[in-house]
């Protein structure tokens, strides 16, 4: 034992020995002397085993690994990140981890530390110093040029944080549209990132984001004082509190849409009216807690600037309509939809207060209490009214339409839908009183039926340029022949769903147009033939831009030949459910004067695989091609066509 202890030699654990070469560090070995319980003579290193040394080295190495910057608390890391010298460095740092990304996105633009001038720059003249110290143009001024849209799965807090950080140096985020779903996980965290980094935001539209609360909207109000448009749709956790925050801190608000927000009521609208003097457009839909108090206060407070007002499915009464009629002095466009608690008195008072002097367009839909008396009052109170649209108002009759026409002398557009008490007598009286009417649309008015005699009240010529008669089964050939005699200025005609229309009933209408038809929609006119299409192309081929023959089963390749030969301006052609074949498609594709943008051959059972090469040669102008239900064209052929027409949207 003594010999072993007293042994000296070069093979020991001295410097340069074989055992030392296996150790991690000589200083590590020395640091462990106090913890080793072995006997050793003075000035002699302890003799230890290799496994012990390796275990200790691994422990120390792990301790060193843990001493990284990520062990710092958020407060310290925040201070480091806000001092990064430029946008490139901030963007690169955001790629390190989600934690760094979220911390960087939480830094407000005002919290970013500015560069200090160097020693050399202090020696320069003051003018040069000011130039060098000025922040980068993109950093100091966000002009809000960029637009971002997030749909469904794309809408996450991480994505919003990335947008906030990435758009700061590129002109600033100006418009943000979030279209979520019930499973969307966007929260106040992501919205707060936008608020802190995007002070130039002026449009925020959120649809179906169930987790956003008043806190997130308040952050937007704090960080985005330039906000001009706010759309909130199906945001159940946003209440009056969030709306009030926007009203008080965003004085530039010009457009407000609140749709199906169950927590918003009258109080928020009252503050909006008082604090937003530039408000021009308001849409409120399906808000259960919004009543007369909110609408009346909003309209009366914002009367100096409000131009467009849309009220949809609200529990308001005649009081609101009376306030609109009295204070809506600058209202240009008014929509009243689904107001079941509004009666005849409300419409009468709204018109007779004579406050809607600038009103040019009004839409009344599903307001069952609108009567002839109310419609006449609207005409009297709105001397500049040019557009009237009435839907599902069942008490409106010919007498009301006649009285309205006698007063509304500058009316240019009339749309009547599901008004079953209106007959052709009322329509002819309207045309007789107002020869300046430009557009007339009659949709699903079951009271419209051909007259047994020709009306004597009609003028010889009227200036109607657009006529729509859709899904009115009582209107057939006789009425259209009368239209052909008096409507020489027609350019747009829509007869979709008029199954009783024949070639003979349209001949006079086609021949009477002096201006030339631009749009012709004959969808569902099942009795029309190639003879009519040939006549139409011959008369109006040089002006025709849109032709819809969807469902005209008697139309064949002969019509396509006429179109290919005579139409030079056509850019939208719908031949769905027609009896066209590969030959007609080939002829159409070979017409060099055609520059079709949209072609529909949906459900054309005679179009086969042979048409694919011809469709591929349609040209660069094609942006839309519909081949749905063309069962004789294989999936492989569609793929090849998509590769060739890569710029075209092909539906199959």
Image (cartoon, helix red, strand yellow):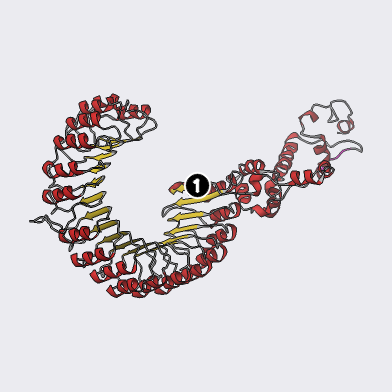
Q: Is residue 609 visible?
A: no
* 400 versus 481 height, above or below: below
Residue bearing mark 1: 148
Membership of 38 in magenta stretch: yes
Residue 256 rendering spot, x and y as whole percentages: 46, 61
* 17 versus 66 height, above or below: above
Residue in view at x 25 percent, y 54 percent: 440
Q: Which residue lies furthest to the left in this view?
A: 452
* 532 versus 278 height, above or below: above
Assess disc 1: are there few (<14), some (14-19) or many (≥20) residues with their C-alpha within 10 Å of its C-alpha. Answer: few
- Which range is magenta? 36-40
* Residue nearest the observer in this picture, 185 or 316: 316
Circle 1 sits in a helix, a strand or a loop, which is it? strand
* Residue nearest the observer in this picture, 383 or 222: 383
Tell whether 365 sits left or right of 212. left
Residue 484 rendering spot, x and y as whole percentages: 17, 47
Residue in view at x 26 percent, y 49 percent: 466
Q: In which quarter of the image is residue 41?
A: top right
Membership of 449 in magenta stretch: no
Residue 246 rendering spot, x and y as whole percentages: 53, 63
The quadrant the C terminus occupies is: top left
Tell whether 635 sits left or right of 55. left
Q: Is residue 166 visible?
A: yes
Predominant SS along the magenta part:
loop
The quadrant the N terminus occupies is: top right
* Residue nearest the observer in this picture, 49 or 554: 554
Residue in view at x 32 percent, y 25 percent: 617
């Amino acid at each position: 034992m003594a010999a072993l202890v007293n042994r000296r030699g070069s093979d020991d654990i001295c410097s340069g020995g074989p055992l030392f070469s296996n150790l991690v560090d000589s200083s590590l070995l020395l640091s462990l002397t106090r913890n080793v319980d072995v006997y050793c003579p003075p000035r002699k290193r302890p003799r230890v085993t290799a496994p012990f040394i390796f275990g200790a080295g691994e422990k120390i190495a792990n301790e060193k690994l843990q001493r990284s910057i990520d062990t710092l608390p958020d407060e310290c890391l925040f201070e480091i990140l806000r001092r990064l010298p430029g946008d490139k460095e901030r963007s690169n740092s955001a790629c390190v981890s989600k934690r760094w990304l979220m911390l960087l996105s939480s830094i407000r633009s005002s919290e970013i530390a500015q560069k200090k001038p160097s020693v050399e720059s202090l020696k320069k003249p003051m003018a040069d110093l000011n130039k060098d110290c000025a922040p980068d143009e993109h950093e100091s001024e966000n002009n809000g040029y960029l637009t971002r849209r997030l749909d469904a799965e794309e809408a996450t807090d991480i994505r919003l944080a990335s947008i906030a950080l990435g758009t700061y140096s590129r002109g600033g985020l100006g418009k943000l549209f979030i279209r979520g779903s019930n499973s969307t996980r966007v929260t106040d965290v992501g919205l707060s990132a936008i608020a802190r980094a995007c002070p130039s935001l002026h449009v925020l539209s959120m649809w179906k984001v169930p987790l956003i609360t008043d806190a997130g909207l308040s952050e937007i109000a704090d960080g985005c004082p330039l906000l001009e448009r706010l759309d909130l749709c199906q945001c159940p956790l946003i209440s009056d509190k969030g709306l009030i925050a926007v009203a008080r801190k965003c004085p530039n608000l010009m457009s407000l849409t609140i749709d199906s927000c169950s927590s918003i009521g009258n109080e928020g609208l009252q503050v909006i009216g008082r604090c937003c003097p530039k408000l021009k457009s308001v849409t409120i839909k399906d808000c259960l807690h919004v009543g007369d108090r909110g609408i009346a206060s909003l309209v009366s407070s914002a009367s100096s600037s409000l131009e467009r007002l849309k009220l949809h499915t609200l529990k308001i009464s005649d009081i609101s309509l009376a306030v609109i009629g009295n204070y809506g002095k600058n209202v240009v466009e008014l929509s009243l939809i689904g107001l079941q608690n509004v009666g005849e008195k409300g419409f009468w008072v709204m018109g007779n207060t004579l406050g809607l002097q600038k009103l040019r367009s009004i839409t009344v839909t599903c307001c069952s209490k609108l009567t002839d008396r109310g419609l006449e009052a609207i005409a009297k109170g709105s001397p500049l009214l040019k557009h009237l649209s009435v839907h599902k108002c069942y008490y409106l009759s010919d007498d009301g339409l006649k009285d309205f026409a006698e007063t509304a002398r500058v009316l240019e557009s009339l749309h009547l839908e599901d008004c079953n008490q209106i007959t052709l007598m009322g329509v002819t009286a309207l045309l007789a009183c107002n020869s300046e009417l430009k557009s007339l649309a009659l949709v699903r008015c079951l009271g419209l039926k051909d007259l047994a005699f020709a009306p004597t009240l009609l003028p010889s010529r009227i200036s109607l340029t657009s006529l729509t008669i859709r899904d009115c089964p009582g209107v057939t050939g006789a009425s259209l022949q009368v239209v052909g005699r008096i409507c020489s200025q027609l350019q747009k005609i829509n007869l979709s769903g008029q199954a009783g229309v024949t070639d003979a009933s349209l001949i006079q209408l086609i021949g009477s147009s002096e201006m030339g038809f631009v749009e012709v929609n004959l969808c569902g006119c099942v009795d029309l033939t190639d003879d009519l299409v040939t006549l139409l192309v011959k008369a109006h081929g040089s002006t025709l831009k849109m032709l819809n023959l969807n469902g005209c089963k008697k139309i064949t390749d002969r019509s396509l030949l006429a179109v290919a030969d005579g139409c030079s301006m056509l850019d939208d052609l719908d031949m769905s459910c027609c009896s066209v074949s590969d030959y007609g498609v080939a002829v159409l594709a070979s017409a060099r004067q055609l520059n079709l943008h949209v072609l529909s051959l949906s459900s054309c059972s005679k179009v086969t695989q042979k048409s694919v090469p011809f469709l591929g040669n349609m040209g660069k102008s094609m942006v839309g091609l519909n081949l749905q239900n063309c069962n004789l064209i294989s999936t492989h052929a569609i793929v090849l066509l998509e590769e060739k027409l890569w710029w075209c949207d092909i539906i199959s």
